Image (cartoon, rainbow, N blue to C red):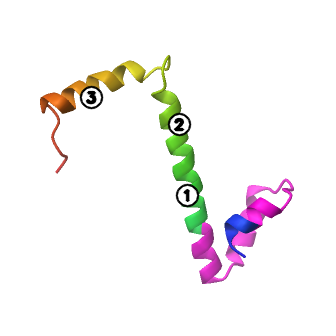
Amino acid sequence: MTCHEVVSKCRFVAVSLAELKQAVHKLSPTDLAELAAFIREENDRAWDSQIDEDFSPCRKLHGLLGEVRNDLRAGHVMDLP
């Protein structure tokens, strides 16, 4: 069963960070790699959600989005080295 399947089927019980760390130390290398990938995906999803929220209409960065698009179209943006 994958991490995603476990998360979707189980009921959550409050677990302290210390308990989570202890449990992680007991994982096999394969399970640890799967957990790490799962956490990265969750973090990426949270980041994407925050970006979407920040740039949505009536939010603090929405006006900046138009400026960035104009700069891109005008060729005022260059790749980082």
Tell me what residue is drawn at x 68 percent, y 73 percent.
Answer: 2
Q: Spatial distance from mark 2 to mark 1, Cα to Cα?
A: 14 Å
Tell me what residue is drawn at x 20 percent, y 27 percent.
Answer: 71
- Mark 2 and mark 1 residues within 8 Å of each other at the beta carbon: no
Magenta residues (range)? 6-35
Residue 8 rendering spot, x and y as whole percentages? 76, 60
Residue furthest left in the image: 75
Residue 39 rendering spot, x and y as whole percentages? 59, 60
In the picture shown, does residue 19 fall above or below 44?
Answer: below
Kindly indicate the quadrant of the structure image that contains residue 10: bottom right
Task: Give the amino acid type for the residue marked by disc 3 in the picture.
Answer: Arg
- Judging depth in this view, the residue of 36 and 3 nearest the camera is 3
User: Disc 3 marks which residue?
Assistant: 69
Residue 48 rendering spot, x and y as whole percentages? 50, 43
Tell me what residue is drawn at x 72 percent, y 78 percent.
Answer: 26
Sooner in the amino-acid sequence: mark 3 or mark 2? 2
